[in-house]
């Protein structure tokens, strides 16, 4: 039986980050991960020379965790164009962030989705979010995202053709019933940085975290099947037992 200081169950981004922080405090930590590779829901498959990320996965460079925890240089982040291509049923249009891509202002203004007021409000919403702290956003009067967008002044047409497919994909909720606080929190980061992917795929993120942990910290293929709260013993399907040092 191994007696580490701390046992972390699950080798997703949260578990790996927790292990990294504990290691920085000088604690002997092990991470028990049931699958064959760390990363949790973040996985990149290599198929016929292509990198296929599972699920809707992107990295916002403005996230505090990106600058505080990740080694962005080693990830070789590749940014997307800050904007969207939108089909209105008749033709395509470009809706771009005018602050990141000033040369696309004309294309944005003539985009067949929404009206001029909607496009002005997009810029105003970006500035509104960036001018507020995360704490003030989390304390903002709560309502659904759809209610907030209507209150802010966006037309129903623009909400349906831009925000529902865009944020509905992020939330997995095209009704936009998610709290506006969460929407504003995310939108603040969309407007403050770039939307990126690591050159080697999203799984490069957990691999980067693992590379900073001591060898043997992450134990893959160790599915936890029993936790004895009285004795503090963690048992895995492979028959191994671990107990945090008291």
Image (cartoon, grey):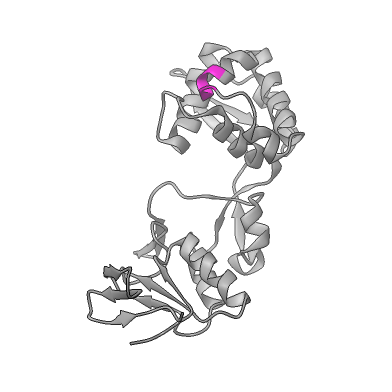
Residue 49, position as x, y percentages in the image: 39, 65
- In depth, the one of 21 and 118 nearer the eye is 21
Q: Is residue 103 left or right of residue 154?
A: right
- 170 and 242: which one is in front? 242
Query: Is 99 placed above or below 26 here?
Result: above
Instruction: Kindly report the secondary structure that dominates the magenta region of the rendered protein.
Output: helix
Counting from the top left corner in percent of width and height, residue 108 is at 65, 25
Comparing 91 with 146, the one in front is: 146
- Figure check: 76 above or below 29: above
Q: Which residues are magenta?
A: 143-147
Looking at the image, can residue 204 be seen?
Answer: no
In this view, which residue lies farthest toward the front? 230
Residue 118 in the figure: left or right of residue 49: right
> Which image quadrant: the N terminus?
bottom left
Residue 226: % across, % down: 25, 69
Residue drawn 62% across and 23% down? 141
At a point 54% along the width and 32% down the height, the residue shown is 85
């Amino acid at each position: 039986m191994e007696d580490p200081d701390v046992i972390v169950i699950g080798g997703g981004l949260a578990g790996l980050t927790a292990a990294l922080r504990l290691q920085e405090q000088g604690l002997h930590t092990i991470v028990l991960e049931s699958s064959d590779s760390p990363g949790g829901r973040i996985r990149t498959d290599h198929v016929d020379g292509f990198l296929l990320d599972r699920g809707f996965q992107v990295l916002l460079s403005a996230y505090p965790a990106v600058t505080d925890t990740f080694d962005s240089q080693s990830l070789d982040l590749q940014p997307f164009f800050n904007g969207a291509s939108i089909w209105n049923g008749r033709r395509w249009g470009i809706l771009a962030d005018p602050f990141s891509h000033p040369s696309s202002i004309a294309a944005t203004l003539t985009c067949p989705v929404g009206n001029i007021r909607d496009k002005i409000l997009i810029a105003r919403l970006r500035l509104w979010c960036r001018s507020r702290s995360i704490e003030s956003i989390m304390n903002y009067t709560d309502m659904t995202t759809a209610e907030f967008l209507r209150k802010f002044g966006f037309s129903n047409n623009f909400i349906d053709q831009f925000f529902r497919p865009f944020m509905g994909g992020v939330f997995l909720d095209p009704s936009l019933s998610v709290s506006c606080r969460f929407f504003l929190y995310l939108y603040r980061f969309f407007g403050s940085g770039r939307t990126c992917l690591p050159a080697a795929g999203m799984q490069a993120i957990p691999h980067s975290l693992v590379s900073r942990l001591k060898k043997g910290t992450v134990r893959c293929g160790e599915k936890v099947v029993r936790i004895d709260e009285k004795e503090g013993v963690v048992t895995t399907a492979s028959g191994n037992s671990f107990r945090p040092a008291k």
